[in-house]
């Protein structure tokens, strides 16, 4: 007869298949198994007999398990923390506590470094790494979960660190000093000394004296001898000159 087969519960809860459980069975169970689920059964004693729950064993027989690796953040920057979370559980999602997880940096920044952690009651182990280098690193985690050696890897690219820009320098100016306005003194005007010129006493001039020189009518033309006319004319002129000179002399004396 062929080997035992996976039951519906075995397939649903643990992902079992006939090829996985094909092994030698060592015994069978009858009666009420209580809350236990039958994962593998086998018709015994003949192929037409009722299928019975059996126990299987052998070097190649193991129950499936799950071992996953999560990275956060997905693209870290150099100088920041990277969190690696390993989860160990059965195929049905039952946490596997106390599993030792070893993480090795296979390549990239800090290659060759090895870190370890142990899963908690939730089947989770957390490892924090940091590097100051830029590049692509491969993190390989190994663990034995439910008797099965598991290996998973994650590739991470470390980006350049964030450039911190210094805040602008604020210059505080000292309060302005208010200077009182200067008092402008008007320039002194030096007046030249006044020279007082004493006015001369007014000169009161006598009104001009009008000297009327009588004009003597020319004597009637007389028939005088030629010699008498020549004597009279010079006398008349001399007389007028005398009178004019006398008048001018008086005027000068009065002015003095």
Image (tube, helix red, strand yellow):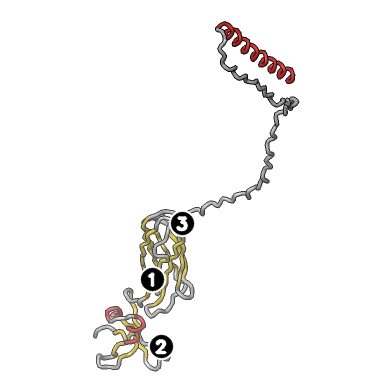
Residue 133 at what x, y percent from top left? 41, 53
* Image side of residue 53 versus residue 187, left or right: left
Q: Nearer the viewer, residue 165 or 215?
A: 215
Dot 3 corresponds to which residue? 79
The picture quadrant where one finds residue 203 is top right
Q: Give the class, few, some or many, for how many residues have Cα within 10 Å of label 3's Cα (few <14, many ≥20).
A: some
Q: Nearer the viewer, residue 86 or 156?
A: 156
Secondary-structure class at tag 1: strand
* Image side of residue 199 versus residue 61, left or right: right
CA–CA distance in space, label 2 to label 1? 27 Å
The reply to whether residue 197 is in sight is no
* Image side of residue 66 versus residue 128, left or right: left
Dot 1 corresponds to which residue? 68
Is residue 136 depicted above or below 54 in this figure? Answer: above
* Image side of residue 217 versus residue 209, left or right: left
CA–CA distance in space, label 3 to label 2? 51 Å
């Amino acid at each position: 007869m062929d080997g035992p087969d996976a039951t519906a519960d075995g397939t649903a809860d643990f992902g079992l298949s006939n090829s996985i459980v094909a092994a030698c069975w060592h015994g069978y169970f009858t009666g009420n198994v209580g809350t236990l689920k039958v994962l593998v059964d086998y018709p015994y004693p003949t192929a037409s007999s009722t299928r019975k729950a059996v126990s299987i064993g052998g070097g190649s027989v193991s129950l499936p398990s799950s071992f996953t690796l999560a990275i956060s953040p997905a693209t870290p920057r150099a100088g920041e923390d990277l969190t690696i979370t390993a989860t160990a559980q059965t195929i049905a999602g039952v946490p596997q506590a106390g599993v030792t997880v070893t993480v090795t940096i296979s390549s990239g920044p800090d290659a060759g470094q090895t870190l370890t952690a142990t899963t908690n009651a939730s089947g989770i182990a957390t490892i924090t790494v940091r590097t100051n280098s830029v590049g692509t690193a491969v993190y390989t985690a190994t663990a034995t979960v439910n008797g099965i050696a598991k290996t998973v890897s994650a590739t991470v690219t470390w980006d350049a660190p964030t450039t911190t820009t210094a805040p602008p320098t604020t210059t505080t100016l000292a309060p302005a000093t208010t200077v009182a306005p200067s008092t402008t003194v008007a320039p002194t005007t030096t007046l030249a000394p006044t020279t007082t010129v004493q006015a001369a006493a007014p000169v009161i001039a006598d009104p001009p004296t009008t000297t009327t020189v009588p004009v003597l009518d020319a004597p009637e033309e007389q028939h005088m001898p030629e010699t008498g006319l020549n004597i009279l004319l010079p006398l008349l002129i001399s007389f007028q000159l005398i009178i004019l000179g006398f008048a001018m002399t008086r005027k000068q004396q009065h002015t003095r």
